[in-house]
Image: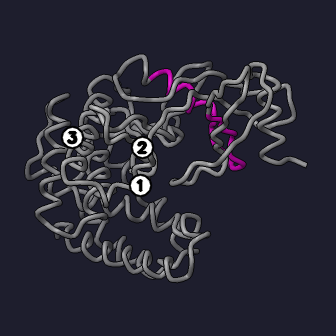
Amino acid sequence: MSTPERDIEAVLDESGPDYEGFSFETPTGGHQSDVYMVTLQHGGESYEVVVKFKPTDDVPFAVEPKLHEYVADRTDVPVPRILVFKEDPEMDVRPYFVTERVHGENLAEEFAGLSTENRQRIMRQAGAILGDMHSEIGFEAFGRLDLHDGRLIVRDWMGSWREYFEKLTRMHLSRLDDTPFGDVAERAEERIEPALDLVPEDGVPRLVHDDFRPANLLFDPEADEPITAVLDWQDVLAALPEYNLAQTEFLFIDSSFRDPEIRERLRGEFHDGYLAQRPMEFGDGYEERRSLYQLSTLLWRMAGFEAAFAEQSGLAQARAEAQYRQQFERLLDGIPL
């Protein structure tokens, strides 16, 4: 019978160095049930790595380790180095890869309680990270990334950003039926449909980490650049940069802080960090589309609500549902009529 301990032992026997023993733990934050932080003992020393197994659902697993190397070779974005990747293991385990262990705390657990200075430093670096990715890596069409003969390709490509964004958003809407938010789908669709005309059709598709949120970042407040690693590269798109920017503003700022002054201060730092890497017009066009992009992001979070909060108490779930509904009403009101 497969267990995490047996599977990790198989990985180490197949791909690891000699060792005298090991221990492991699962990371906090995010939805990383297939990820294990492993500590090896050898010669009186301890060595740390991270092992990630292919999830049980049908996802293109090989694209993630490819992206670690692809991004590291082309940008200064902090990504863990791939040590081993086995798409077809000899041992009886799922496909896996092993990365170096990058030290840092999970940002989702600490962000709201950080000092003003550290939050601002993080937002400035987050902007610089996205600016670096968007300036260095582009594609020929919009869509989700995959691999073909070892090369990154756009899988479900479209030539129109507006059409692809509509496709993404309708997919989120279609998944609401089996969640506590099935009642909002019709209202959302009625407001989104006419607002799609605001979304550009053309533009250069850029690399977009479609799950760029605090739970997928490690940070060290003592470091000059506090974000030490960007994790979880399995959801990556070729998309317009403004979509990624609006998402990040929502996931880091607008869904976390109610004080308008705090929001605008953090938003300013985020924009400044981005502009240090590449030009961007944060003017009326972006601002009128921001709520639409953010509503699509919230619908994605609503669709995954039950998986995200499955292990939380009923009270925690009720609070989160109420927060999501408040955010929904605010974003719906923010979409131009």
- Give the number of callouts: 3
Find residue 124 and name its label. 3
Residue at mark 1 = 108
Q: Which of the 4 image quadrants contains residue 110?
A: bottom left
Task: Tell me how far mark 2 sits from mark 3, CA to CA.
Answer: 14 Å
Residue at mark 2 = 217
Task: Identify which amino acid the numbered label 1 is placed on.
Answer: Ala
Element type at mark 3: helix
* Chain part drawn in magenta: 50-70
**Crowd band around label 3 with a 10 angstrom C-alpha radius: few (<14), some (14–19), many (20+):** many
Q: Residue at x 50, y 37 (%)?
A: 233
Is 92 on the left-hand or right-hand side of 35? right
**Crowd band around label 2 with a 10 angstrom C-alpha radius: few (<14), some (14–19), many (20+):** many
Pointers 3 and 1 in contact (CB under 8 A)?
A: no
Q: Residue at x 28, y 28 (%)?
A: 132
Q: How far across and how far down the image is residue 118, in percent?
A: 24, 47
Element type at mark 2: strand
The answer to whether residue 75 is above or below residue 254 is above
Q: Which of the 4 image quadrants contains residue 76?
A: top left
Look at the image and tell me whether residue 160 can be seen: no
Counting residues from the N terminus, which is met first, the one under dot 3 or under dot 1? 1
Is 180 on the left-hand or right-hand side of 137? right
Color scheme of the displayed model: one colour
